Amino acid sequence: MNRLLIATAVVALSAGAAYAQAPAAAPADAAPAVAAPALTIAPHGDIADTLKASGQFTILVKALDATGLTPVLKSAGPLTIMAPTDAAFQALPADQLDNLMKPDNAAQLQGILTYHVINAAVPPAKITGSKGPIKTVAGPEVQIDGTGATIKVNDATVLGEVGVSNGTIYAVNKVLMAPSAAAPAAGGH
């Protein structure tokens, strides 16, 4: 089962580059006023190693390991990840995270995690002053808005970002859920 999930993720990543879209440009007269990041992340090699070394993404790292996605985030890339902080995961409704981490829910957890990954380089220079959809590895698009005081991804706020050897990490204050993603019931598997 895990091999199937990993193979599916690798195929999705390979195909995702063809679908990745740059955010629509903001009007030329719109002057972005992006605030300084609230969270500092030091680069430490690739995406997976940087998330682990940070100490602020322990739940994300555990979820990536549980779904077999860590090797994908160690690949050559370029990849972009909207990385929920531990506080973002802890803000989920009671028992939702525990249920998602159960082995029987690995496919659903993997779907949620791949909704946070873009199979393309999306550095801050592409986001600042721009607004628009970008297709994720999971398929559905996230809405990026870099036209305000802070960068937004859907309804999450970017707390900080860092470029690493295989892409970019954006720390976000919420776990992103694709429009069709439903959490397992509290009494789940």
Image (tube, grey):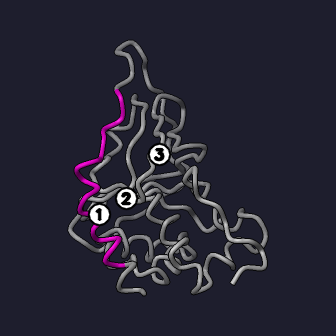
10 Å neighbourhood of mark 3: few (<14), some, or many (≥20)? many
Answer with left or right where residue 187 lies relative to residue 140. right
Q: Which mark is residue 142?
A: 3
**Label 2: which residue?**
137
Which label's residue is closer to the chain start, 3 or 2? 2
Gap in angstroms between the C-alphas marked 1 and 2? 6 Å
Q: Amino acid at mark 2?
A: Val
Q: Measured along the vertical axis of the image, is residue 138 above or below residue 95?
A: above
Image location of residue 15, percent across then percent down: 25, 58
Please state which of residues 99 and 153 is positioned toward the viewer in this rendering: 99
The count of marks equals 3
Gap in angstroms between the C-alphas marked 3 and 1? 16 Å
10 Å neighbourhood of mark 1: few (<14), some, or many (≥20)? many
Answer with left or right where residue 175 lies relative to residue 67. right
Q: Measured along the vertical axis of the image, is residue 103 above or below residue 157?
A: below
Q: Secondary structure at mark 2?
A: loop
**Label 1: which residue?**
13
Image location of residue 123, percent across then percent down: 31, 46
